[in-house]
Image: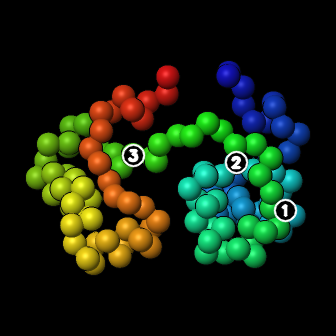
Amino acid sequence: MGSVPSKFFRLFFYTYGHRNVVRAVSSGLAASGSVDGYVYDVLRETEPDLVARTRIIRKSELLGFPPVACASVDAASPEISRLREGLVNMPADADRRRVLGMLRLDGFSVEKPALSRPK
């Protein structure tokens, strides 16, 4: 919107992570902060006491999970192809399904880049 935080907020600081935002708000260090809904939901399950000291004041529209991205020049490389196949095929293997479970994810899919671009 053509502004910088110092012109919009009286006081601000960066936490460098969504979990740290929740920690800062929970402890009273910050009055509010922006957190990805996926992170907040996982924290609600894994660290309920931390999340219990916060409340949601606004939710955005439902958005997709952030993409796993690489430089376009590397997209066809053998390494990236193996990574892509490994991620997409995670549900087919019991050990990998356990990892997905730990991440609270169902799986990964290959989508068109436009899906992750702002409109």
Q: Secondary structure at mark 2?
A: loop
Sort mark 2 into few (<14), some (14-19) or many (20+) by Cα contacts within 10 Å: few
Residue at 60% of width from left, 51% of height from top? Answer: 36
Q: Using the numbered discs, state the Cα–Cα distance from disc 2 to disc 3 in whole angstroms.
A: 19 Å
Q: Give the position of the N terminus as an image quadrant.
A: top right
Sort mark 1 into few (<14), some (14-19) or many (20+) by Cα contacts within 10 Å: few
Residue at 84% of width from left, 37% of height from top? Answer: 9
Q: Which residue is mark 2?
A: 34
Sort mark 3 into few (<14), some (14-19) or many (20+) by Cα contacts within 10 Å: few
Q: Amino acid at mark 3?
A: Pro
Q: Using the numbered discs, state the Cα–Cα distance from disc 3 to disc 1 in whole angstroms.
A: 31 Å
Which residue in the rendered view is the most extreme toward the left? 78
Q: Which residue is mark 3?
A: 67
Direction from residue 92 to residue 10 in the image, left or right: right
Q: Secondary structure at mark 3?
A: loop
Residue at 77% of width from left, 52% of height from top? Answer: 56
Residue 108 — which label? none
Query: Colour scheme used in the picture?
Result: rainbow
Direction from residue 50 to residue 85 in the image, left or right: left
Q: Using the numbered discs, state the Cα–Cα distance from disc 2 to disc 1 in whole angstroms.
A: 14 Å
Percent coordinates x, y for residue 109 in the rendering: 29, 48
Q: Which residue is mark 1?
A: 29
Direction from residue 21 to residue 115 in the image, left or right: left
Instruction: Choose top left, top right, bottom left or bottom right for residue 113.
Output: top left
